[in-house]
Image (cartoon, rainbow, N blue to C red):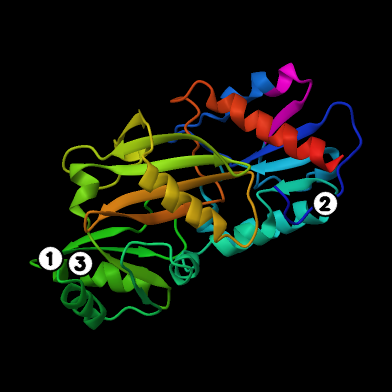
Amino acid sequence: MRCCPNEFKDLTMPSIAFLSTDNLEDFFVYDELLIPYFNDRDWSVETISWHKKSENWDRFDYVIVRSTWDYQQHAEAFLACLEEIEASTATLLNPLSLIRWNIEKHYLKDLQGKGVPIVKTQWESAYDNSVINEAFSSFKCDTLVVKPTLSANADDTFKLSQADWLEQQQVLSDTFNQRDFMVQPFLKSVVDEGEYSLFYFDGKYSHAIKKVPQQGDFRVQEEHGGSLHLISADHEQLDIAQKALSSMPCNALYARVDLVRQDNQWAIMELELIEPSLYFNLDEQSPLRFVEALVNVHQAGI
C-alpha cells in the first residue's frame, strides 16, 4: 500500500490503535481475533472510541479504523477526528483521502465511469413523490430500495412496494428532505441467493463470504438476522472486484467488495473502505493475513 504516507516511527515495538465507538452492545465484532497475532510480533494494540476527547494519537504508529459503526450519524465530527489523527505522527489506515472518497456512495459513479458494473441507481438530492414513481417506471420493477448516500448498517433504508408505497410517503419525505439519497431496483437475488463479500488486505485477496437475509427480511447484516457462509469466490467475482480496487484513487490496507447478481451478471453493491466488518471469524487464516499485510506495509516504510 502506497498512499498518503506519513513518516513511520522507528520503534522496535510498533503500537496500534483500533478506532471503535462507545457502545458495540448490539453489534458483532471480530477484531479481537487480530490481537494475538500482533502480540506474537511484539506489536501492542489498544481499542479507542473515536468519540474520546483529547487523545494523544502521537503515541501510536498506526490508527486503524475498525468498528466506528455510528459514524454515519455524526459524519462531520467523525471526519474531524480523522483529520486530527492524520495531523499526528500516527499513520491513519485507511488514509483520510480514501475515506473521504468512500464516505458517500457517489463513489459508485466513479466506478461505473471506469467500466465497473454497479447496481442500477437513480441519484437524488431532494425528496418528491415523483422521484419514486419515476424509478418504478425507469427500472420496470415493482419493488424499490431507497437509502441515503451516506449510510451504514442499513440505517434509513426502505423497501418500497409499488402497490402500497404511498403509505410511507410521509416518513420518506421526513427522512430524505434536503438529503442526498439513492433509489435502486430491489434485487430478488439478494433474498434468493444472498450478497457476496470479497476481502482484500493490502491489495491481496484473502477470503470471501455469502450473506443471506433471514426469512421475511432483505437486510443481510448479522444485526438484522442475516446468516454468514464462507465461500470460494469464482473468477468472474474476482475479476470485477479487482476492477473496483483498481479504480480507487489510492490503495487500501483493507477493502471489502460487496457483490450481487443483477440480470444474471455480477454487480458491485458497495466497495467498503471505512469500517467494514472483515469477518475474521469465518476464515481462520484471515487474521494472520491481515497482520502480515500491515507488517509488510510497515517494513516497506522503514
Question: Where is residue 56 drawn, in percent x and y?
Answer: 82, 43
Q: In 3D space, how far apart are the residues under numbered discs 3 and 2 (Cα atoms)? A: 48 Å
Disc 3 marks a residue whose amino acid type is: Gln
Q: Residue at x 33, y 37 (%)?
A: 210
- Which secondary structure, mark 2? loop
Name the residue tied to disc 2: 6
Q: Earlier in the sequence, mark 3 or mark 1?
A: 1
Q: Nearer the viewer, residue 192 or 50?
A: 192
Name the residue tied to disc 3: 168
- The image quarter containing residue 8 is top right
Q: Residue at x 45, y 70 (%)?
A: 109
Mark seen at residue 142 = 1
Q: Is residue 39 magenta?
A: yes
Q: In 3D space, how far apart are the residues under numbered discs 3 and 1 (Cα atoms)? A: 15 Å
Q: Residue at x 30, y 74 (%)?
A: 173
Disc 1 marks a residue whose amino acid type is: Asp
Question: Where is residue 197 drawn, in percent x and y?
Answer: 41, 42
Q: Earlier in the sequence, mark 3 or mark 2?
A: 2
Q: Is residue 277 visible?
A: yes
Question: Where is residue 46 drawn, in percent x and y?
Answer: 71, 30
